Structure formats: C-alpha cells, structure tokens
Image: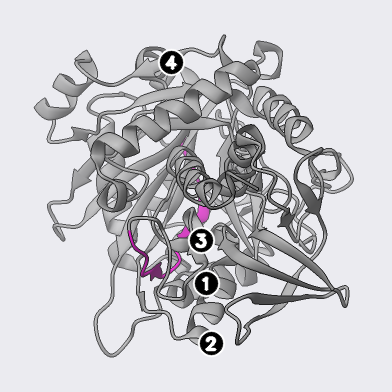
Amino acid sequence: MKKYDIIIVGAGAGGVFMSYELAKMNTGAEILVIDKGARLEERQCPIKLGKTSNCVKCNPCHIMNGYGGAGTLSDGKYNITTQFGGNLHEYVGVDEAMNLMEYVDDVLCSMGGASAKLFSTASSDLKTECLRNNLHLLEAKVRHLGTDRNVKILDKMYDYCEEKIEMKFRTTIEDVERKDDGTFLVRTDKGDEYTCDNLVLATGRSGSKWIGNICDSMGIEQKKNRVDIGVRVELPAEVFKHITDDVYESKIVYKTDKYNDMVRTFCMNPYGEVVAENTNGIVTVNGHSYDSPELHTENTNFALLVSNHFTEPFDDSNEYGESIARLSNMLGGGVLLQRFGDLVKGRRSSERRMKKCFTKPTLKATPGDLSLVIPKRQLDNIIEMIYALDKIAPGTANEDTLLYGVEVKFYNSVVKVDENLETSVPGLYALGDGSGVTHSLSQASASGVHVARILAKKYENK
C-alpha cells in the first residue's frame, strides 16, 4: 500500500490544471492522479475512426473520460467571465476568480494557444441588437482553441507534469474510507489500495453520481442542482456568420412569453460538427469545431437549453434528465434528428424528407419526432427561442434548420465547501464541475489552480 501526500480523482480540466500548478511549484509532495478514462493518445471515438456510424457506448466513453476530461474533444472554448459557467466567484471573490481564469489563459497561451484569437462580447453591436429584440447577451472574453489545438496543448501539459506527478488511467476508485488518523484510504477496481493526507474530488460531470455517493457516506452536505434539457441546433454557417465572426461564442438568454421560462444558447461551434456522447450509458448530443480551416464544415451548431429546478417532493433533477434521454435512446437507438419545419407542423422527419433537406447533418442520427420525447413546456420554449433568434439571425427559423435531441447538461449537487473548496471533512476537497461549483472549462481549470496553491503551502518546505 503506497502512501501519497495528495491524490487527485479525475484528470479533467480541474485535475489537469491542479497537477500542472503543483508540478510548477515543485513542492516535492508525492502526488497521484487517477482517472477511469484513457491516456490522451488513446482517446479515440469509434465514430470518428470510421468504424461505426452510431454510438456503441464504449465504457468508459472516450469523448467524456480520460486525460483532459470532457473538454478535450469538445472545441477547447474558454470563457473568461463570472456571468456564466459556474459560481467560483461566490467562494473566492469576483476579482480572484477573474485573476485565476486570466492565469489559466496565460498557461494555455504559453503551451501553444497564443495564436488563438481572444474574442469579446463587451460593447459589441450584437449586444445592442439583442436588447432591441428582447434578447440578452452575456459578457465574456472567449479564447477559442479548437479541438485540434486543444489536444496539442493538453499533450504539452501532460509532458510537463509526468516527471513530477504520477498518473494512473483506466482505473476506477470503488471505495474511499477515512481512517482514524485522518488520512484517506482509496481502493480501486484493480485491487490496489492507496492512502493520502489530502484527497481531491475532481471527477467532472460524468462523476457526479460517484461524488454524491462519497459525500453521502461521509456526511457531507449537498444542495440539489438543476438539469438543463434541450436540443442541438444545426444550420448553415452563413446564418450566424455575422455573429460568430465578431464574438465567436454568443451566450444569449431569452425569457419566453408563454411560460416566463429562461432559455439560453450554449456551446456555439462555428463551422463545426455535431457529436454523440455517452454519459453513464445514456447517449446524448454535443458539438465542437476545429481551429484548422481544412477541417471546417459548412454548418454552425449550438445548443438551446431550458433549465429545470424542482421542489418537494421530487429533488433528483439528474434522474429527470436521464429519463428523457433514455426515451430518446429508446425511440431512436441513440440521437434523434428533426427538421424545424417538421416539428412546427406536427409531423415526424423521415428518411424521405431528410433527403430533400438543404442542410446536411454532420452527425448520422435517426430521423424522428422530438415531440414524443421532450416535454411540451420545454419544446414550446425552444420553438419560441428559435423564432426570437431569427430576428437577429434571419434564417434560424428556416424549415431545414436541424434539431438533434436530446442535449442534456447534468449538474452535480452542489457540494458544501468553504473558500478553499474544502469540505466539512478536513483534507477532502471538491472542485470543478463535479462539485457543482463550476460549469465551464475556465472556471473548472481555475478551481484546480486555486486548490493547488492552497495545498502547495502545506508542502513548501518538504
């Protein structure tokens, strides 16, 4: 049984930047990173390799797990803002949160991202145009690396850390126990046992259930979070070109007239492609784009999401989202696809109708009827939002605009932590999207840097 000073569970954005910062500070601490996914070079989706046209539910999913986490193969988009993407600023303060995200950006640039353009939505003409049409553009600086450049940067970060940080992949932690002396005992599916003084939970959204179980077993308070349900929209890139060329990522929020619900755009990918991803055996949809022009498509895609919060007696928002995704998988064998024109006319999209569609899908999906899957309230909200967006980007409400379903963003219950992101159990930290504190690459990465600096002080004289 080997003893470590620090064990980091999860090699996603939070775990990567935490290990980078600890390696940079050269504390001499014994550090282990454990992830259930594969090494970076082994993260190959069978769909991308051309071995299959449909998700085969790899366990674990290479899109969601492995070095770099779910952010590795999904566009490399870092939003520097506290207006969305999590609540890190509520724990460390707005100024410190922004400083940490700016530092993350500096690291990315030093590792090969400096030539990536830094966009900004502040003081843009788009903000004025949105306000004129009852839409609200959130402010952020956006560094778009692209999936291809993002992978190269992460590869450099791995090389930087590997001599000082031990990493184990394709390894699942089955049990965590706090011993009488205050240390933690970690057991893996390989039959190995490790102990450590400080345990950091950084599993990302795909590990939300696992973190919840650990918190329950140790009596750590959690607050139920929301689940976002919606669709991924795909349309000709020319429709949003005047927006994406200017600000790239536009986070637009709309309050619907019918229900007074909030709908927002999410993860906009100019000239990108739609992809399937597997979360705990459930196939949902996402999108990304590349930096290299030769890898661009003719389409732009983005998500439209409706947030769902629940009150008593039901409080399991993730289970609600999973049930809707399961229904989509049952009807379509995976991801469902429908033309917007078919949806508003109350008819399913068929193979025959899709052959006449001018917008060519970038993901092979099953033509169907999203109204059989997504609840009426959410679907009404999405349709109303599409018509609202059509006012600032004419063509959004075209009959041949494609809707993929479902897109679900699962949020872990918010783990109760202090300003150091330490739980009520001394030495146990929770950070990144798995903690419910952050919801973005920038904030998850920043949280990893924050905890690394705190723990480094414990070992600065080692």
- Asked if the residue at tag 4 contacts the one at tag 2, i.e. Cβ–Cβ closer than 8 Å, the answer is no
Q: Nearer the viewer, mark 2 or mark 4?
A: 2
- The image position of residue 386, as x and y in percent, is 31, 40
- Asked if the residue at tag 4 contacts the one at tag 1, i.e. Cβ–Cβ closer than 8 Å, the answer is no
Q: Which residue is mark 4?
A: 118
Residue at x 70%, y 48% (from the top left corner)? 63
Q: Amino acid at mark 2?
A: Ser
Q: Nearer the viewer, mark 1 or mark 2?
A: 2
Viewer-closest of 433 and 138:
433
Residue at x 59%, y 64% (from the top left corner)? 198
Q: Amino acid at mark 1?
A: Glu
Residue at x 86%, y 40% (from the top left corner)? 50
Q: Earlier in the sequence, mark 2 or mark 4?
A: 4
- Asked if the residue at tag 1 contacts the one at tag 3, i.e. Cβ–Cβ closer than 8 Å, the answer is no
Residue 354 visible in the current orientation: yes
- The image position of residue 304, as x and y in percent, is 38, 46
Q: Which residue is mark 3?
A: 434
Q: Name the element at disc 3.
A: helix
Q: Amino acid at mark 4?
A: Leu
Q: Nearer the viewer, mark 1 or mark 4?
A: 4
- Left or right of 433? Residue 228 is left
Q: Name the element at disc 2.
A: helix
Is residue 406 shown in magenta?
yes
Viewer-closest of 331 and 299:
299
Q: Can you name the residue that lies furthest to the front here?
A: 461
- Asked if the residue at tag 3 contacts the one at tag 2, i.e. Cβ–Cβ closer than 8 Å, the answer is no
Residue 81 visible in the current orientation: no
Measure the alpha-carbon separation of dots 2 and 4: 43 Å
Q: Name the element at disc 1.
A: helix
Q: Which residue is mark 1?
A: 322
